[in-house]
Amino acid sequence: MRTIQGVSVSAGIAIGTVRVLAAVDYAVERRVIDDPQAEMDRFRAARDTAVAQLKQLRDNVAAEFGENKAELFDAHRLMLQDPDYAECVEGLIAQDKVNAEFAVKSVAEQFAAMFAAMDSSTMQARAADVKDVSRRVMNVLQGKRDSTAQDGSVQGDAVQNGIVQNGTAQNGESHIIFAEDLAPSDTAQLDRAKVLGLVTAKGSANSHTAILARTMGLPAITGIGDAFDPADDGHVAVIDGTSGAVFVDPDEATLTEYRRRKAEAEEHLSLLRKLKGKPTETKSGQRVHLYANISRPSDAAAVLANDAEGIGLFRSEFLYLEREDWPTEEFQFDAYGQVAQEMGDRPVIIRTFDIGADKQVDYFNLGHEDNPALGYRAIRICLTRPEIFKVQLRALLRASAYGNIAIMLPMITSVQEVRDAKRILEEAKSELRGERIDFNESIQIGVMIETPASVIMADELAAEVDFFSIGTNDLTQYTLACDRQNPSLERFADPHSPAVLRMIQMTIEAAHRHGIWCGICGELGADLSLTDTFLRLGIDELSVSPTSVLPLRNVIRNH
């Protein structure tokens, strides 16, 4: 057995025979031409044909996966129609008297290098897009056709390897596809009946290919690099799209374990089919909003796959924990905006960074504390280092123009803390107005109820914010005076304690008195033994891990 570690881009398990896609050679000969105008006319005609092909592909994707998933190919069409792109191609033809194919390839490489050099991961992913659309134009120039053409003729790496819609896989079997890379247009045309999963040497979790794989429900792993080996063709493999692990020629123990996991996943999928799109509502008509918790932008795929109604907690501190230096405003805007766009109209509640206590970051230069759980953390860092806080707030505000984002403040103990945070937020808003940068002027602000102080002050806090979200992990710790990092206190740290449940009840009642909603985003939200209690207390929202969404919906709907 050979074990390879890649990067997870789409969850799920696939077990099957490997089909290695042979890379198609896109070498283009440079030729000197006598009539630059005729060559420019060739380019324009090929570009128009490529645009028409993308329109057909866009319509096909929209019909199968929805309008929002088809927007990628609208972007591809706009990329081809960009005057700068055409001007560069035609300028090269006119100046160097080269053939159109060579000019298109040269400009594609130039634009791709420019995108790849940018700080934004979203813009870096556009490097693959510009290569994809340019390859389409080159194929037209070279007399190759697209699989969306009326006569059924095809183009592209995946197409030429016979695994697209209307194509035929070897022996009519389904395969796990191994490839150096896959273009978005190739991925969109894969015949899902013949493809079990995808593994690529190159690519990223932010690429359009990755997003399409998630949309299609295909387990996918990228970034295996030099471990990609064409000799794996025909061998049995297991891929774990959650962990990013690939097992080639798996041993019997690995096969048995992953067959068990796959069966569990299929049972979960059956529950999804049964409950997808159904409201989270009791038999008596009590409605509860069911959201999911995430730590990284790539987790949004699991939220959608499990049919959560939104994101109730995006732990933004992981953008800080996984870096060796301060995340810039642009980096954060890119991450928040990506999630907002992927979630569409669904709410995305982003908690401002909760650094400190058990989440230490070297470049914050936090001093040693004997009791960090009661020390310098979360909102306390934000308010005493506003220059750091404002960077995050500006990024959040900018991202709010691209989706339904709300801001949540952690570890609140007083009304003054909320007012101070809102003052810094207003400063950030004022700066963005001055820079003429769009954002949601009415963005909602909420607080996490995690301390006994915030429960006691809940009536006053409710007058300042739009919603409450109860963080039961810390609320249990602070209410029972039990350090949750200390294993010897486990028997005393009972989250079912009447004291904790009464704190939750007091918070919900205060929220409702002031006309705001109240949710739970801690681990207790997924505790099915307490679901009846939370419903009786009138909870408005529960935010849990993505895989807990459907079992919880099932319990609520049968209540």
Image (tube, grey):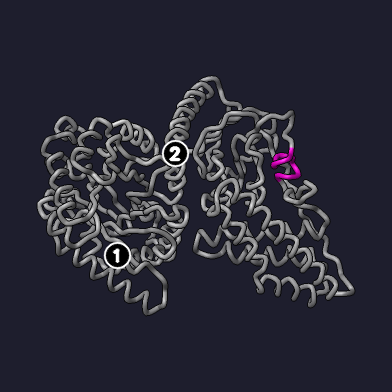
Residue ID at (40%, 67%): 398
Which quadrant is home to the N terminus? top right
Instruction: Work out whether residue 378 can be spotted.
Output: no
Residue type marked 1 = Phe
Q: Secondary structure at mark 2?
A: loop
Give how far across and how far down residue 66 sits, in percent.
Answer: 55, 50
Residue ID at (68%, 57%): 54
The numbered disc on residue 389 is 1
**Crowding near pointer 1: few (<14 within 10 Å), some, many (20+)?**
many
Q: Does residue 21 appear to the left or right of 448 in the view shown?
A: right
Residue ID at (64%, 66%): 111
Q: Which residues are magenta?
A: 158-167
| Residue identifier under label 2 | 276
Residue ID at (60%, 66%): 114
Give how far across and how far down residue 491 sits, in percent.
Answer: 16, 30
Q: Can you name the residue that lies furthest to the right here?
A: 34
Does 142 lie within the magenta span? no
